[in-house]
Image (spheres, rainbow, N blue to C red):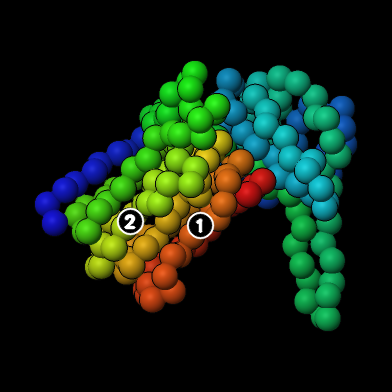
Amino acid sequence: NTGQLEVHGKTRVRTWTFATTTALAGSWNITTLEPVDYAAGEKVILSNSDFGSNFEELTVAKTVDRHYVYFTTPLQYDHKVHRVEVEGKVVDLRYEIGLLSRNVIIQGDDIWSDGQLYGVHTIAFMSGIYHMENAEIRKCGQAFNFGRYCTHSHMSGNMEGSYVKANSIHHSYQRAVTTHDTNNWEVRDNVAFDIQGHAYFVEDGAEHDNYITGNLGVFI
């Protein structure tokens, strides 16, 4: 009941947004729906725009006027902006761009984690205070080990005030965010990429009053 984890990286304008224009293979930039502050050298992920695996992990060259993101290498695939009407409802199929880089990094071992599928994990166990925001969590989770996920509230009951928000969670060997027998916490505005297993996982089904909103998942 007394454990407390405080991880607070630099606050960003937003962690992910939709693109507004189709970008064809060979293009060097995209246009975002909402303003972003992605800086030169930071890593981003472009999501699929069709069935298949045409997502791309790219490095930012610059962002102009907070809407025009340029990359250090051209796009390998087409990324289309389109919407489909189904039974009178419009389904938004615009692709997304998500920020992977953060100024605070929590990670598994650079040499051994990939080969062993054994990375870092963080957990609130049987209550406590868990504040994780604006961090980059990578090479995380431990494949086939119960309870060893990148971020995790485990049988914690009322976790009001605790949260996992605005993080980048990528290259995970087991899940991204796990909510297990936990109520009243917040999972918001995270970017999950290259995740084995569920990304945003509610474990037992008895959990209630959790706010799991505004999250992006790519290549799950």
Q: Residue at x 82, y 52 (%)?
A: 51
Label 2 sits on a secondary structure element that is strand
Residue 129 percent across, percent down from the top left: 22, 52
Tell whether 83 sits left or right of 17. Answer: right
Tally the marks: 2
User: Badge 2: few (under 14), some or many (20 or more) residues near its Cα, within 10 Å?
Assistant: many
Q: Which residue in the structure is indicated by mark 2?
A: 153
Q: Residue furthest left?
A: 2
Residue at 64% from the left image edge and 25% from the top image edge: 60
Q: Return the residue at label 1.
A: 200
Q: Name which of mark 1 and mark 2 comes first in the sequence.
A: 2
Say what amino acid the circle numbered 2 marks: Ser
Residue 199 appears in the picture as rendered = yes
User: In the picture provided, is 82 more to the left or to the right than 128?
Assistant: right
Residue in the image at 82% along x and 80% along y: 88
Residue at x-position 37% and y-position 63%:
180
